[in-house]
Image (cartoon, helix red, strand yellow):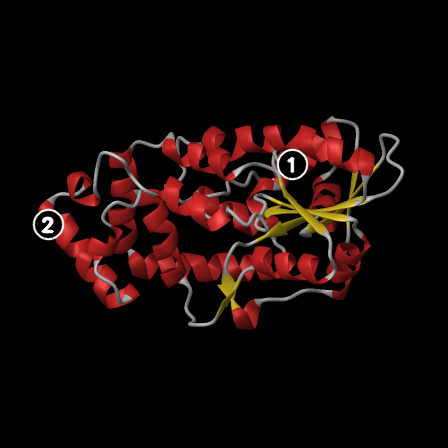
Amino acid sequence: MRMNCLLIYLLLLIAGCGTPKEIQKKVTEENTLLWRITGKQLSQASYLYGTIHMICKEDFVLSDALKLRFDSAAMVYLELDLDDPAMMLKTMKLSMMKDKSLKDLFSKEDYDKLNLYMRDSVGMPLLLFNKMKPITLMSLLYTKALPCDKQESYEQRFLQMAQSAKKEIKGLESLEDQFAVFDKIPDSVQAKMIMEMINAFGSQRQQFQQMTEAYKKQDLAALHRQISASPDIAGYEDVFLVNRNKNWIPVMEDAMKKNSNFFAVGAGHLPGENGVINLLRKAGYTLTPVK
């Protein structure tokens, strides 16, 4: 989630629109992860949900309201089409470096330190991942930031639910598009991010726990404070967030003209001036919080 999200205070979006008391009321009303999309001559509502890509099993919740809206949709859109039978093969291909290895990107001291961390935390030597892109390796390391052994993924659960209900699944972007986002970050920067992560693993885990608590409370403002304080995406806000949000809007619009859809994306993509919620509103749609 930290790699996919940059949140902007909802309070800043509505400043000047009312008294402080009215502003606080508005923030509270919109403190939700589930949204109904109507208007602009849509014949049926679609729904938008903000996910956290990985969470401890005991913290994983699917509310009755969420399941009801999921069941009502004809199609399911995730960031990626996880039902693509070629997904695993594509991921393997796109995850690998062609002309470099991790040994080329890290100093000997850092490589040895990372190797020790991989052995102790992941249970596998770094050599097995030597041709993997640093950003892909980081996604594996992030799972170790969760203070639990059993984890859940909202995307995987939605995939299972869609398959059981025989709902078609599509992606708002291709796997190639998503990897192209990460490829815009220099390898040296990616390597530095990995070392910063393992050097401050204790604080990383604490921050992740705080983020999980904010997510469980659907507290978008708190999520913003935590994510915006992270250096992980500093300078890459447009790459990770804004450009992708803007690219998704026409895909969503085209889909909503044809069917009722359930869209699920990382929660950090929802709020902000260039968040999916505001971009859809600017396009003429009505987005209503669903409690």
Q: Quick check: 267 above or below 145?
A: above
Does residue 72 appear to the left or right of 96 in the view shown?
right
> Can I make out residue 15 in this image?
no
Write down the quadrant of residue 21 in the picture: top right
Where residue 144 sits in the image (x, y, percent)?
36, 62
- Say few, some or many: other residues with alpha carbon within 10 Å of mark 2 (under 14 / 14 to 19 / 20 or more): few
Three-letter code for the amino acid on which mark 2 is drawn: Glu
Q: Disc 1 and disc 2: Cα gap in Å?
A: 42 Å
Mark 1, residue position: 276
Q: Is residue 56 left or right of residue 31?
A: left
Q: Residue at x 23, y 34 (%)?
A: 99
Mark 1 element type? helix
Q: What SS does tag 2 mark?
A: helix
Give the class, few, some or many, for how many residues have Cα within 10 Å of label 1's Cα (few <14, many ≥20). Answer: many
Q: Which residue is mark 2?
A: 109
Nearer-N-terminus badge (1/2): 2
